[in-house]
Amino acid sequence: MDHYDVLIVGAGHGGAQAAVSLRQLNFEGSIGLLGDEADPPYERPPLSKEYFSGEKSFERILIRPANFWGDRDITLLLNRRVTAVDAPGHRVTLADGSSLSYGKLIWATGGAPRRLSCVGGDLKGVHGVRTRVDADAMLSEIENVEQVVVIGGGYIGLEAAAVLSKFGKHVTVLEALDRVLARVAGEPLSRFYENEHRAHGVDVRLNAMVTEIEGKDGRASGVKLDDGTILPAQMVIVGIGIIPAVEPLIAAGAAGSNGVNVDEHCQTSLPDIYAIGDCAAHVNGFAADARIRLESVQNANDQATTAVKSIIGQPQPYHAVPWFWSNQYDLRLQTVGLSTGFDEVVQRGDPAARSFSIVYLRGGKVIALDCVNAVKDYVQGRALVIGGVAAAREALANPEVPLKTLVPA
């Protein structure tokens, strides 16, 4: 086929969910699900956790069994990449020069790992963590590695560091800012995780600026810092964010800068073209900023449903409360809401007990919670975030007071 009633570009969480939702909502037209990898849709978060550690096989992280797509008459177009979009002509051009036409287009491409700009950033042994190929490449090298440097103290970097420390490797985490998780969490949580990783033997270095990746025989051998320090490393993992994969849409005239702009129904400024997930810049009712991108499975899945409902004529504006999770060692962090723009923090419980929560407020109202091994707080705190509840600080700080009792009747 060279035409699909709905063509979905990007076979990650968002793209897969869009295809699934179309069939669940009884869409009978043709569906093409196009991805630039050889594998059918699979879960991304386990790449730096359960898959990397060997706890889960690849088959266990497939979003659906391999035969699911054919059974639902969803055509998988794998190892394909869109290089250009002809919006007026409703047609996309692929890297091999072929083209496909569409009735509606859902752009769900996510992004590519941001690469190092310094000398040596392209040496063998320097890895991002975005695809199965990335994870497999690291696993194939790990037996010959003793020292690993992780550049970036965000969730991806810290999760990889936790797994590598379990493997018995000497791991150093380099963070350019003055604390880990600085862009997504308050200082109490940052300091807790810094201490946790150090207790497991990870060397966490803050305010660390990388100037060069040193190499030997074409492979990484060390990481040089701006103070002249050279850290020996046979593997370097880079977790410094992603670049939204939206170039063809922007070139076609879609509005956007950091990602592609979408409205409340996930429609771009181009006719019959939607964008969802990591690459979609949207107005979010739980954010302090006017327009944001959310890099999370929850956002990709919920925006997929929003786009599909618009396509089938059952429009429903996107208004999902954001949530995230991260597994490191025996710690399960669950986050609900967006803490950006907070002006007050309340600590609930004792971090030393390894079960506590951080409550974020803005203008006296609860906007987010970070819950470490505190499932009840996470579940009950959701209503506080959705309602923007102004609760007494003493009650929020007291773990003996159930958060559900703070929600107005």
Image (tube, rainbow, N blue to C red):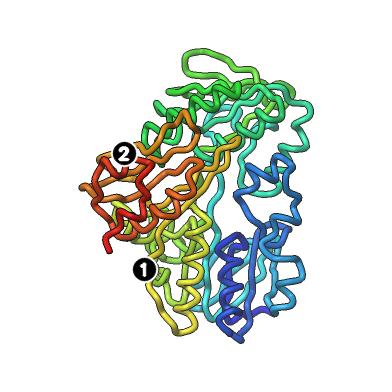
- Amino acid on which disc 1 is placed: Asp
Give the answer, above or below, for where 44 lies relative to 141.
Answer: below
Q: Which residue is mark 1?
A: 263
User: Helix, strand, or loop for circle 1?
Assistant: loop
Residue 26 percent location from the top left of the image = 58, 85
* Residue 370 rendering spot, x and y as whole percentages: 42, 43
Numbered circle sitting on residue 240: none
Instruction: Please report the residue visible at 28 percent of the width from the left and 45 percent of the height from the top.
Output: 361
Vertical arrangement, residue 357 with respect to residue 63, above or below = above
Q: Is residue 382 above or below residue 214?
A: below
- For the C terminus, the quadrant is bottom left
User: Residue 62: percent from the left, percent from the top?
Assistant: 70, 59
- Report whether 256 appears left or right of 45: left
- Characterize the local packing of mark 1: few (<14), some (14-19) or many (20 or more) Cα atoms within 10 angstroms: some
- Residue of label 2: 346
Say which quadrant the N terminus sits in.
Answer: bottom right
Q: Amino acid at mark 2?
A: Val
Please tell me which residue lies in front, 329 or 185: 329
Give percent across and percent down for residue 200.
60, 24
Rendering quarter of residue 181: top left
